[in-house]
Every structure is written in structure tokens, then in C-alpha cells.
Image (cartoon, rainbow, N blue to C red):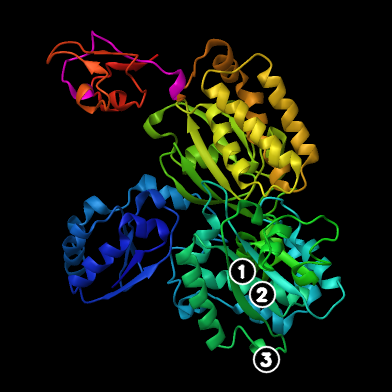
């Protein structure tokens, strides 16, 4: 038998390293190794046990205290010892209903062992590309596949590769954009942490296709585990001659470097990323010229994100037609989403394009926590928009999502229930983009601040007649006048929440009420005397002494003293504290 512990960032945060140490302390007598994130983040820490026939027993939410029971199971085969830890049939469906290409090795192989990747057909696509195919043939296969950039824009990958290929000059660069900055998005991080060699192989194939001898990964410094494992993978590949000179005896040579970015959201825009790579402040360049003609150090360059490159080796091995057979007419292949928020099963989901939002949120994600009504889903992060419940059967492809006012984006999917204030949600994302604006153009630098000020007033009950119309006017002015994609898409969360949830804006402005009961300035806490048992729990938890009453007698709240922290509401076990 062998034991494998999921040690992606999510698993480690949940205590996976302590679980592994506890298992080692038991001296079980079998191999104990690590893997990356399988995508079931809501069940971490996860321990997979493979028998000699490679049959899998998956244990979830494991703690160090479970080590002895696991040791008993390994030695005796008695499932009763670990029955309470075994993954349920409902949770098995989380993975069974996915189609995994970019994530195919994640949570399966050891990300720190190149031989594990090679054993999973790793680097066979690279060898095929550089030894048996011309660069033009590689580009043609990618063209046939219909692979589009998974970073958000959805631009045809083959077109960018071909443009860089045809640009004059001997010195060219291939760059991976791993500056994943969207709140709630962690797809790229998981791929690098769990399957770094897949990224390297896809990049090397891309470098061969465009004629680049230099490959660069621009990754955010907030991903220390991803950087650590990528560095180790590069070193291992160099030792085996997979990175460096004369790869597989083909005459193709390519080196790899890593650049850790400081975490500026604007550096997700390709020309701002190039500026940062060159040591300058990350600010977008005017286009044209495009990076394919004048990019890094003004040399022809190609930039794709992690997920895009993670599909490349599979496409080369299986053919462009196989990838194109999945998805819709205008959106081919699969897409990875980071599903978070008020959903029962949060984590990484990879599905063919053409599935619906309902398929992801309810069929794979298990529906809403507490079975509360589904209200909306935020797609595409700060650059995306909110899609309401009545559009839950929207097909997941670039065109259909764009028609709602949202975007595919890099794959963030934040699920919301009835307790989410949509005005507050718009304010949250706009606060992010306003802070992340590089300041180069006035529309983005000043316009987002003015919008944020208005949203702040509205959520405090200080909204005025005409605010909604003024917000819309500012949104369109910013979209038309901003220089780069960050500014042009920053208004999307505001525009979509006004479009689909205008009544909530009107309630905040006209009635000075937050229908979701989330905006603290518009909430008043009261105690229902008929439900109050006089347990004093609310009074004991109130930090300012605003709750009073005798033991076993109905309590009351002094609205003047109340700071609206909500401690009384969350501590009451009888539903006696209500929001008004």
C-alpha cells in the first residue's frame, strides 16, 4: 500500500502537514508521500490510500488524531476503522461529473517528482513536437483545437503564436502570466502547485512554436508554495536535459526563469506585466505595437496564462480535433473554475464549455449552503459581473456569458445567496479595482474613486435621487475612456447589479433599508420578546453593554448604544434577535 496526502495550499492550511507527520510517527510500514490539490478544497485535509492493485480509498477531513485508525486500516484492511472518514457518494460526484484536462494530474501525482510526471506520459508531447513536428504544424494543431486564452480575453491562442512566429528577429520570448489577482480565483495557483511540469511542457511547446529560446514565468509573490515547486521542477527538468540546450536532440534550446511579481492586479494586463518584468512600474503600454511585434525588451513576445499552457501537451498528444470536440461552436474545450462563496462544495471544477451555471453550482457544487435560495453568481472577478438567479441556465461560453454583462474571466465564480447585498458586492469589487488602478489614465484613476464614494454613501443610507443614473453615466465614461482592460471592465459589477438588482439600489436610496440585511448602517437589531428566553447570551456577547434584561426575562437592545456589530444576532440560539 501507499498513502498520499493532499498538500496544496488549501490542504496545508487545513492541517495536512500535521496529518502527514502523525502518520509518519505511526511507523505504518508503507510509502507515505504527497500530492497537490485534487480540487475538493471543502474536504481538506484529504488522504488517499492505494492498495497493491492501485485501488483507491479516499479519506476526507482527516485530523492528526485519525492517524492510529488509518494505521489499523492499512495493517488489517478493516474499513470499519476509517468508515467515518471515507468520502461520501455525493462528494464523489464532485469529481465524477467533471472532465479534467488542465487538472488531469492535479491531486494524483507528486508535484515534486519529475519521474511521477513522466510516468503519467509527461514530456511525450514535447518530444513529439520538437522531434516530429515543425513549428507551423504545432500551431496548426492548436488552431484546429480552438484553444482560446484562458486568462479572460478568450483570444485564439494559435493567432498569438503565429503572430510571434512571423515577427522578424532571432531573439524572442515566451511568457507565462501567472499573476492571478482576482479575489476568489486560485486556478493557476493550484496548477503550478500540483502539476508544475505540465506548465513547463506547455510553455516549451509554445516556445518551440514561436521560435523563442527564453521562457519566463511571471508569478505573484503571494504564491510561495507555487514558486517553490516550480523552481524545483525547473531544476529537475534541467538535470534531465528537458530544459536547456538541444532538447531531445532536436536542436531546439530554451531556458527558463521565474519572476516574482509584487501583486499588482494591473500586471495581469500583458503590457503592464512586461513593464514590470523590465523593472519598471507596472503600467499598460499603448497598443499597437502588440507584444508579438514588440514585447519584452521590445523583442517579439507571446503571453498566455497558466491554464492555457496546461492544455497544450494534452492537445498535442490527443490531437486538436479531440479538444475541439468538447465545448460549443465558439468556445472549445474545457474551462477551470474556482467555485467559492455560499455553495456547499467549494473548490476547483473543470467542465466542458457548454455546460450551464446550474450544472456547476447545483449539480457539481451541491447547491447552496443551508439550502438557502440562490441569488446570484459573480463571474470574472472584479472585471466581471453578477448574473441573477433567473439566468442560472445560461450556457458557459464566451458569447453567452458576455450577453449577460458578465465575462468568463480567468474562472472565478463567487456564489451568493439571499443574505448578500448586491450594492455591497458592487462596492467590494469596485473598492478592489480603485485601489489596484495604476493611475495612468484619468478615467480609471478618478472615475473609479468617484463611483466608490457614491456606493459608500448609498450603503450608509446617504444615497440621493439621481445617484443610480449618475453611476451609470460614470460607468460608460470609464469603459469608453480607460486605457487598459482593468479600467474598461471595472464598471461591470456596478452595471450588472444595477441592471438586475435595481430594486436594491432604490431601497437603499429611497427607503434607507438594505433588503439583504447586510449593510450595518441600515440595520437595527431588535429582540422579539415572545422568543427571548432570557439566557443572557446576547448581553454577555455585546461589547458595549447595549443589551439589558434579567435572567429568564425578555431582554431589550438600546439602539443608541448599539454599534451594530451583530454579536447579539449571531449568538442567539432561539432566533429572538432580529434585523429590522
- State the extent of the magenta-drawn residues as a range: 520-538
Residue 394 image position (x, y, % from top left): 63, 35
Q: Quadrant of residue 467?
A: top right
Quadrant of res 392? top right
> In the picture shown, does residue 408 fall above or below 158?
above
Label 3 vs label 1: CA separation? 25 Å
- Between marks 1 and 2, how big is the CA–CA gap? 7 Å
Q: Circles 3 and 1: CB distance less than 8 Å?
A: no
Q: Residue at x 61, y 83 (%)?
A: 243
Q: Nearer the viewer, mark 3 or mark 2?
A: 2
Instruction: Measuring from the top left, give residue 41's x and y in whole percent.
Output: 41, 52
Please provide percent x and percent y for residue 201: 61, 74
Compared with residue 513, is residue 8 higher up or lower down, i.e. above or below? below
Q: In front here: 340 or 503?
A: 503
Vertical position of residue 12 compared to residue 251: above or below? above
Is 525 inside the magenta-drawn segment?
yes
Q: Nearer the viewer, residue 385 or 522?
A: 522
SS at badge 3: helix
Residue at x 67% of width, y 71% of height: 316
The x, y position of residue 119, in whole percent, is: 49, 78
Mark 1 = which residue?
217
State the separation of the CA atoms marked 3 and 2: 19 Å
- Give the mark nearer the N terminus: 3 vs 2: 2
Which residue was labeled with disc 2? 215
Q: Residues within 10 Å of mark 2 (few under 14, many from 20)?
A: many
Amino acid at each position: 500500500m501507499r498513502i498520499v496526502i493532499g498538500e496544496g495550499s488549501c490542504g496545508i492550511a487545513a492541517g495536512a502537514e500535521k496529518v502527514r507527520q502523525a502518520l509518519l510517527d505511526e511507523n505504518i510500514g508503507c510509502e507515505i508521500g504527497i500530492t497537490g490539490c485534487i480540487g475538493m478544497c471543502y474536504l481538506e485535509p484529504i488522504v488517499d490510500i492505494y492498495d497493491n492493485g492501485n485501488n483507491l480509498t479516499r479519506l476526507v477531513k482527516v485530523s492528526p488524531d485519525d492517524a492510529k485508525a488509518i494505521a489499523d486500516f492499512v495493517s488489517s484492511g478493516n474499513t470499519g476503522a476509517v468508515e467515518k472518514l471515507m468520502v461520501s457518494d455525493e462528494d464523489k460526484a464532485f469529481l465524477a461529473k467533471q472532465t479534467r484536462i488542465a487538472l488531469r494530474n492535479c491531486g494524483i501525482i507528486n508535484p515534486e517528482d519529475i519521474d511521477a510526471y513522466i510516468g503519467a506520459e509527461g514530456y511525450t508531447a514535447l518530444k513529439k513536437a520538437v522531434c516530429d513536428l515543425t513549428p507551423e504544424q504545432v500551431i496548426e494543431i492548436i488552431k484546429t483545437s480552438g484553444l482560446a486564452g484562458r486568462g479572460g480575453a478568450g483570444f485564439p491562442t494559435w493567432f498569438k503564436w503565429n503572430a510571434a512566429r512571423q515577427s522578424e528577429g532571432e531573439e524572442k520570448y515566451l511568457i507565462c502570466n501567472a499573476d492571478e489577482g482576482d479575489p476568489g480565483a486560485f486556478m493557476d495557483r493550484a496548477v503550478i502547485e500540483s502539476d508544475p511540469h505540465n506548465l513547463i511542457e506547455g510553455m516549451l511547446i509554445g516556445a518551440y512554436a514561436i521560435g523563442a529560446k527564453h521562457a519566463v514565468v511571471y508569478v505573484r509573490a503571494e504564491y510561495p508554495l507555487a514558486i517553490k515547486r516550480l523552481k524545483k521542477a525547473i531544476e529537475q527538468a534541467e538535470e534531465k536535459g528537458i530544459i536547456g540546450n538541444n532538447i531531445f536532440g532536436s536542436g531546439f534550446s530554451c531556458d527558463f526563469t521565474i519572476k516574482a511579481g509584487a501583486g499588482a492586479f494591473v500586471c495581469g494586463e500583458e503590457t503592464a506585466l512586461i513593464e514590470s518584468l523590465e523593472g519598471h512600474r507596472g503600467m499598460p503600454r499603448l497598443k499597437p505595437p502588440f507584444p508579438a511585434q514588440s514585447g519584452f525588451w521590445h523583442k517579439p513576445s507571446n503571453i498566455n496564462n497558466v491554464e492555457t499552457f496546461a492544455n497544450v501537451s494534452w492537445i498535442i498528444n490527443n490531437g486538436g480535433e479531440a479538444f475541439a470536440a468538447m465545448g460549443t461552436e465558439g468556445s472549445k474545450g474545457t474551462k477551470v473554475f474556482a467555485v467559492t462563496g455560499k455553495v456547499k462544495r467549494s473548490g476547483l471544477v473543470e467542465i466542458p464549455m457548454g455546460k450551464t451555471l446550474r450544472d456547476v453550482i447545483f449539480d457539481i457544487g451541491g447547491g447552496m449552503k443551508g439550502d438557502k435560495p440562490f441569488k446570484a453568481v459573480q463571474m470574472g472577478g472584479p472585471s466581471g459581473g453578477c448574473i441573477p438567479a433567473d439566468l442560472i441556465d445560461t450556457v458557459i461560453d464566451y458569447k453567452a456569458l458576455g450577453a449577460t454583462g458578465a465575462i468568463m474571466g480567468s474562472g472565478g465564480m463567487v456564489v451568493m445567496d439571499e443574505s448578500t447585498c448586491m450594492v455591497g458586492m458592487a462596492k467590494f469589487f469596485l473598492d478592489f479595482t480603485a485601489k489596484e488602478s495604476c493611475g495612468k489614465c484619468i478615467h480609471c484613476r478618478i472615475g473609479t474613486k468617484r463611483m466608490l464614494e457614491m456606493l459608500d454613501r448609498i450603503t450608509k443610507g446617504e444615497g440621493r435621487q439621481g445617484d443610480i443614473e449618475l453611476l451609470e453615466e460614470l460607468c460608460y465614461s470609464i469603459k469608453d475612456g480607460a486605457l487598459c482592460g482593468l479600467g474598461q471592465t471595472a464598471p461591470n459589477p456596478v452595471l450588472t447589479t444595477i441592471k438586475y438588482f435595481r430594486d436594491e439600489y432604490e431601497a437603499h436610496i429611497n427607503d434607507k433599508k438594505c433588503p439583504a440585511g447586510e449593510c450595518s448602517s441600515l440595520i437595527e437589531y431588535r429582540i422579539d420578546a415572545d422568543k427571548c428566553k432570557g439566557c443572557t447570551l446576547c448581553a454577555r456577547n455585546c461589547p458595549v453593554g447595549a443589551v439589558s434584561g434579567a435572567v429568564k426575562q425578555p431582554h431589550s437592545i438600546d439602539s443608541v448604544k448599539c454599534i451594530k456589530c451583530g454579536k447579539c444576532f449571531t449568538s442567539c440560539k432561539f432566533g429572538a434577535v432580529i434585523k429590522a
